[in-house]
Amino acid sequence: MAVNLKGKDMLTLRDWSTEEIWQVLKTAEQLKMFRKIGHVYQPLQGKALAMIFTKPSTRTRVSFEAGMFQLGGHALYLSANDLQLGRGETIEDTGRVLSRYVDGIMIRTYKQADVERLAAGATIPVINGLTDDYHPCQVLADLLTIYEKFGRIAGLKMAYIGDGNNMTHSLMIGGAKLGMSVVCASPAGFTPSPAIVDYAKSLAAPSGATVGVVASARDAVNGADIIYTDVFVSMGQDADREQKLAALADYQVTPQLMAAANPGAIFMHCLPAHRGEEVAAEVIDGPQSVVFDEAENRLHAQNALLSLVI
């Protein structure tokens, strides 16, 4: 049964039920089909989305801006220099003011607390385009891609290899809610938040899925249907670049690692990718890679989200 999502924030997948996530995925499937056959669907005519970027991005900006246009609405790009946040205005007041002008806010920034504060002040839906802790919109696109490739999500196993970051957190939560097991292979000092891992474990248990963290990449990919990685050094971490690259050197996704997974396993990466660091070129450019389908699905998953919450 369809659920009414109008006005709902997307701050993290923690706040979304299994049914609500599936509502987004099934809507995305339909909107992707509409676009393929040239059917114009514009439920957001006359609507506007404010896009706040204190952390830049290619895929996030283009997919949200193009998506609002396709849905009949308009997107406004607001950098840190376009706002009064750096000159004393509170985040809550920014949310209150923007709520008088536009119909939704997407924010891509560093602190999750800033997104929460923005939503506390706003009276319109707030969408987390990425923080240091979570990346829910990317995971909606990932789940859509997995569903397309396997025809199901429950019962599958994902091995996440590398730095236990915001992607790891959101993949564990989203996977657990939909019955997919997620195991992360990370070296000491680079594992995901223990509190988030424990939370994801509590979500996974009722469905029979599992969530865990191991040290060995080879152990993680055993029985895996999906191998996932992200850049080893994220934006803003350049000061620690050499230390991180050295610590994560043994966690590159190679053809040998892919061969240790299940037959038919796919490779995923949220992009941008650094070939020769977190992934070998032969993998990301090879037949098991679905990274560009995954990137395209940012558009369709977010179009679904926008059409449902605005």
Image (cartoon, grey):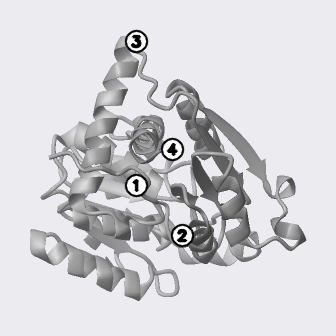
Element at label 4: helix
Whether residue 307 is situated above or below residue 254 in the rendered picture: above
Give, as a three-letter code, the residue at label 3.
Gly
Horizontal side of 114 relative to 147 (left or right) equals right
Frontmost of labels 1 and 2 is 1
Q: Which one is in front in this view, the residue at disc 1 or the one at disc 4?
A: 1
Q: Are marks 2 and 4 in contact (CB under 8 Å)?
A: no
Q: Secondary structure at mark 3?
A: loop
Q: Could you say which disc has been placed on residue 268 in the image?
A: none
Residue 101: x and y in percent read 68, 47
Instruction: For residue 202, say whether it is visible.
Output: yes
Q: In terms of sequence position, does the residue under pointer 1 or pointer 2 come before the other?
A: 1
Residue at x 54%, y 69% (from the top left corner): 249
- Work out how far the residue at label 1 is from the one at label 2, CA to CA, in angstroms: 25 Å
* Secondary structure at numbered mark 1: helix
| Residue 65 x/y as whole percent | 62, 36
Residue linked to disc 2: 249
- Label 1 neighbourhood size at 10 Å, few (<14), some (14-19), many (20+)? many
Instruction: Give the left or right position of residue 134, taking residue 223 as reference.
Output: right
Which numbered circle lies on residue 139?
Answer: 1
In the image, what residue occupies the spot 66% across and 47% down? Answer: 50
Q: Please name the amino acid that badge 1 sits on.
A: Val
Mark 4 and mark 1 in contact (Cβ < 8 Å)? no
Question: Which mark, by number, is residue 38?
Answer: 3
Question: Which residue is at a point 50% across and 59% down the rendered structure image?
Answer: 230
Question: Residue 188 appears at what percent x and percent y?
Answer: 47, 87
Specify which label sits upstream in the sequence, 2 or 4.
2
Mark whose residue sits in front, 3 or 1? 3
